[in-house]
Structures are given as C-alpha cells and as structure tokens.
Image (cartoon, rainbow, N blue to C red):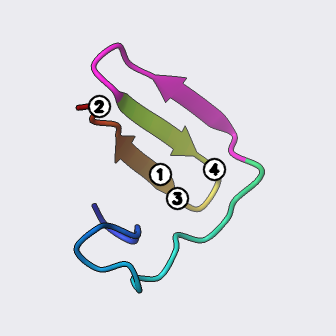
Amino acid sequence: MLGTRSVWDPGAPRPEDDASPTGFSQSPAGWFFAQNKESLKIAFRWKF
C-alpha cells in the first residue's frame, strides 16, 4: 500500500488528509476510490 502505515513500517508517513473528495465509490470486493480535482486515490481493504 502506498503512503500508508503498516505492520512492516509503523513509522511510515500517513497519507495526506483530504476532507473534500468530489466522488467516492466502494466495490463489493473491497476496492475504494476517491477523486477530487487534483488526484484519484485508490485503496483496497483486505479482511482476514
């Protein structure tokens, strides 16, 4: 995962906060998409 903290590197920088996405969607498979004027953010949630 890019720009996120993880169990492998707890000191990794946190992603920048963006409280105003222009679009947001979630798929059943766990993919999340958020878009604003300047960027598209993609995330995946994996539950185990």
Quarter containing the C terminus = top left
Name the residue located 52 percent from the left edge and 74 percent from the top edge. 14
Are there few (<14), some (14-19), or many (20+) residues within 10 Å of tag 4? Answer: some
Viewer-nearest residue: 6 or 14: 6
Q: Label 3: few (<14), some or many (≥20) within 10 Å?
A: few
Image quadrant assignment for residue 16 = bottom right
Classify mark 3: helix, strand or loop.
loop
**Which comes before the other along the chain, label 2 or label 1?**
1
Residues tagged 1 and 4 counted as in contact (Cβ below 8 A): no
Is tag 4's residue or tag 2's residue first in the polypeptide sequence?
4
**Callout 1, which amino acid?**
Leu
Span of residues in magenta: 21-30
Instruction: Identify residue type, mark 3.
Output: Ser
In terms of depth relative to the viewer, which is nearer, 18 or 13?
13
Question: Is there a contact, CB below 8 Å, between mark 4 and mark 3?
Answer: yes
Q: Secondary structure at mark 1?
A: strand
Q: Residue at x 27, y 19 (%)?
A: 29
- Quarter containing the N terminus: bottom left
Q: Which residue is mark 1?
A: 40
Residue type pointed to by label 4? Asn
Residue 39's disc is 3
Task: Kindly identify which residue carries mark 2.
Answer: 47
Tell me, yes or no, whether the two marked residues, 1 and 3, touch with CB atoms within 8 Å. yes
Helix, strand or loop at mark 2: loop
Q: Amino acid at mark 2?
A: Lys
| Distance between the alpha carbons at the discs numbered 1 and 3 | 4 Å
Who is closer to the viewer here, 28 or 40? 28
CA gap, disc 1 and disc 4: 7 Å
